[in-house]
């Protein structure tokens, strides 16, 4: 059984419809998901381009590689391992900041 059993009907002018449709297309969300986000004071961001996703994949790959190196270093040199761990933390925070800036909806 569906959790959402209520419907709302809205009448829009041509300009309003075109504006909403354009914003929905730019966000990459479905109409329902976009409208729910706006109803709960979250403004969806535009869907990032492919370059953003390529950069995020590279960042995550680097994080993964650095984590593997940290495990190896940890068994030999605890000081070097600590420095590498700190760098991993910085990269991880950077990844979260990028996600917040480009992907997560803004709260009104």
Image: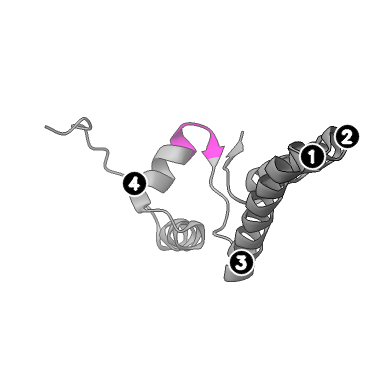
Give me the C-alpha separation between circle 2 and circle 3: 33 Å
Residue that label 4 marks: 32
Crowd tier of the residue under label 3, counting other residues whose Cα lies within 10 Å: few below 14, some 14–19, many 20 or above: few
Nearest to N terminus: mark 2 or mark 3:
3
Disc 2 versus disc 3: nearer the observer: 2
Q: Residue under circle 2?
A: 79
Which residue position holds label 1?
76
First in residue order: circle 4 vs circle 3 = 4
Marks 4,3: beta carbons within 8 A: no
Residue at image position (48%, 39%) is 38
Is residue 40 inside the magenta stretch? yes
Viewport quadrant of the N terminus: top left
- Against 26, is 73 above or below? above
Tag 3, which secondary structure?
helix
Q: Is residue 94 above or below residue 18?
A: above
Give the image location of residue 3, x and y in percent: 21, 30
Identify residue for label 3. 54
Q: Position of residue 100 (x, y in %)?
A: 65, 43
């Amino acid at each position: 059984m569906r959790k959402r059993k209520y419907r709302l009907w809205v009448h829009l002018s041509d300009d309003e419809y075109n504006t909403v449709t354009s914003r929905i297309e730019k966000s990459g969300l479905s109409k329902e998901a976009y409208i729910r986000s706006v109803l709960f004071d979250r403004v969806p961001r535009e869907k990032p381009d492919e370059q953003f996703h390529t950069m995020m994949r590279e960042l995550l790959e680097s994080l993964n590689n650095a984590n593997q190196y940290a495990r190896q270093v940890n068994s030999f040199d605890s000081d070097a391992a600590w420095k590498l761990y700190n760098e991993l933390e910085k990269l991880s925070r950077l990844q979260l900041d990028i996600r917040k800036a480009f992907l997560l909806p803004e709260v009104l």
